[in-house]
Image (spheres, grey):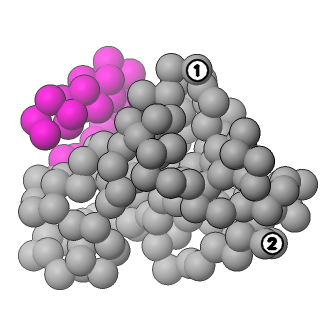
Amino acid sequence: MEKIIKEVTSLLEDLNIEYRLYNHKAVFTIEELDTLDIKFEGMYCKNLFLRNSKGDVHYLLILEDSKKANLKELARYLDSTRLSFASDERLNKYLGLKPGSVTPFGVINDSKDEVIVLLDKDLVGLDKINFHPNTNTATITISYSDLIKFLEYEGNRIDLVEI
């Protein structure tokens, strides 16, 4: 796990992105995260790995943890075929991640920039947002602008969406 975290933090440092790292026990849901005895600054985000019905387009949806994504509505918004959650195998193939560790930092492993990143418009401009660093045994806090800097460096397409 240390190697996985180091890969993310080293890239953040190379990009001059300020971050705060919290190590903790493995958590698989926002609810489990809330039980930790850690005061995270800022908002925690849900990260959903989705695919269209043909399986030829993959999305990483990042939204406020308190929101629920309506996949039918989102598909219409994107002018996409029906959306569903991608399999664990696809998650590993495209982002190199395991269930419970879905995060925008997974695009590090998307060497062909195939995954489209969908950002909830309500995240724009936030000072502090939280994500796992490709493992669910830690959390990283960064700013929205630094998240964009990271994603632009990685080269994946980024779309703002209304959730």
Q: Is residue 18 magenta?
A: yes
Tag 1 residue: 112
Q: Residue at x 17, y 81 (%)?
A: 35
Q: Is residue 54 magenta?
A: no
Q: Of 77 and 58, which appears nearest the observer?
A: 58
Is residue 152 shown above or below 139? above
Q: From the viewer's perspective, is 67 left or right of 44? A: right
Q: Residue at x 38, y 22 (%)?
A: 15
Q: From the viewer's perspective, is 72 left or right of 121? A: right
Identify the mark nearer the N-term, 1 or 2.
2
Is residue 24 shown above or below 114? below
Q: Of 128 and 100, which appears nearest the observer?
A: 100
User: Residue 106 appears at what percent x and percent y?
Assistant: 41, 38
Q: Which image quadrant is residue 128 in?
A: bottom left
Instruction: Describe the element under mark 2 as helix, strand or loop.
Output: helix
User: Residue 34 appears at what percent x and percent y?
Assistant: 24, 79
Q: Residue at x 55, y 38 (%)?
A: 148
Q: Is residue 76 visible?
A: yes
Identity, as a three-letter code, of the amino acid under mark 2 = Glu
> Which mark identifies residue 73?
2
Local crowd size for mark 1, using a 10 Å CA cut-off: few (<14), some (14–19), many (≥20): few
